[in-house]
Image (cartoon, helix red, strand yellow):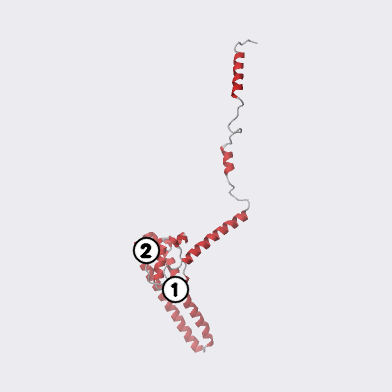
């Protein structure tokens, strides 16, 4: 064993430093969690525990939103309608269709009247029944042809107005502006949804 004259001095200095510094602690007294562990603690499960209750709640929220949107369309509240109904060219289409008289909007009442007539001829003599049936069929076809020509001409005029005001985008295939106009024109005015913005015809959009 070799005697070291500096050993006691170094040891005493180290002991003094340890006693002066007091007990050593690390931060919060516990090790800092790793990043993966911290992220895992903050993550929520992608699949809820109660799937049935989650689906039921989502369905209820969707139904409430749809009811609110339908009520907005029924009352004419444009700010709470679905986004598709708030498009400026769709608003223009609705105003244009509502401003004019469309032969096509009488199609359902006209069909009901024709059916009543067709069933009523059963009680008539055969010769009269044939004449009534033939006349009814001719009237039906004449009306359908006239209504189709009327709405086709209206769409041609409206299409030009849409392009001038909103550009080609408003009449693009994906927008379905033509079918949107036809569907609205086929509906009786008081049954239309969204509700017409004016009570009477003649209010043409600018």
The residue sitting at the right extreme is 1
- Label 2 or label 1, whichever comes before in sequence order: 1
Residue 144 in the image, given as x and y percentages of width and height: 43, 76
Q: Which residue is mark 2?
A: 162
Q: In the image shown, does 109 or 80 lie closer to the viewer?
A: 80
- Residue at left 60%, top 57%? 56
Q: How many marks?
A: 2
Mark 1 crowd level (few <14, some 14–19, many ≥20, 10 Å Cα): some
Residue 43 in the image, given as x and y percentages of width and height: 57, 44
Q: Are marks 2 and 1 in contact (CB under 8 Å)?
A: no
The residue sitting at the left extreme is 164
- Residue at left 62%, top 14%? 8
Q: Is residue 28 left or right of residue 192?
A: right
**Regarding mark 1 in the picture, which secondary structure is present there?**
helix
Q: Which residue is mark 1?
A: 105
Residue 85 in the image, given as x and y percentages of width and height: 45, 62
Q: Vertical placement of 120 versus 26: above or below? A: below
- Residue at left 46%, top 82%? 136
Q: In the image shown, does 55 or 120 lie closer to the viewer?
A: 55
Q: Is residue 149 left or right of residue 60?
A: left
**Regarding mark 2 in the picture, which secondary structure is present there?**
helix
Q: Is residue 101 left or right of residue 33?
A: left
Cα distance, mark 2 to mark 1?
A: 22 Å
Quarter of the image that includes the C terminus: bottom left
Quarter of the image that includes the N terminus: top right
Mark 2 crowd level (few <14, some 14–19, many ≥20, 10 Å Cα): many
Image quadrant in which you'd find residue 16: top right
- Residue at left 37%, top 63%? 162
Residue 168 in the image, given as x and y percentages of width and height: 37, 60
């Amino acid at each position: 064993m070799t005697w070291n004259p500096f050993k006691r001095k170094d040891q005493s200095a180290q002991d003094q430093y340890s006693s002066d510094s007091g007990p050593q602690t690390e931060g919060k007294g516990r090790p800092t969690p790793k990043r993966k562990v911290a992220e895992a603690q903050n993550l929520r499960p992608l699949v809820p525990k109660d799937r049935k209750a989650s689906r039921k709640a989502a369905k209820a929220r969707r139904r409430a939103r749809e009811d609110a949107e339908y009520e907005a369309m029924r009352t004419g509240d444009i700010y709470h309608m679905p986004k598709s109904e708030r498009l400026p060219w769709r608003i223009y289409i609705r105003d244009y269709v509502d401003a004019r008289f469309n032969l096509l909007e009488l199609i359902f009442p006209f069909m009901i009247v024709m059916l009543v007539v067709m069933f009523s001829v059963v009680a008539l003599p055969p010769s009269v029944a044939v004449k009534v049936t033939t006349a009814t069929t001719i009237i039906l076809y004449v009306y359908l042809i006239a209504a189709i020509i009327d709405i086709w001409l209206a769409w041609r005029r409206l299409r030009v107005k849409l392009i001038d005001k909103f550009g080609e985008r408003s009449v693009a295939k994906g927008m379905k502006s033509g079918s949107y106009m036809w569907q609205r024109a086929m509906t009786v005015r008081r049954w239309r949804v969204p509700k017409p913005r004016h009570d009477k015809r003649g209010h043409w959009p600018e």
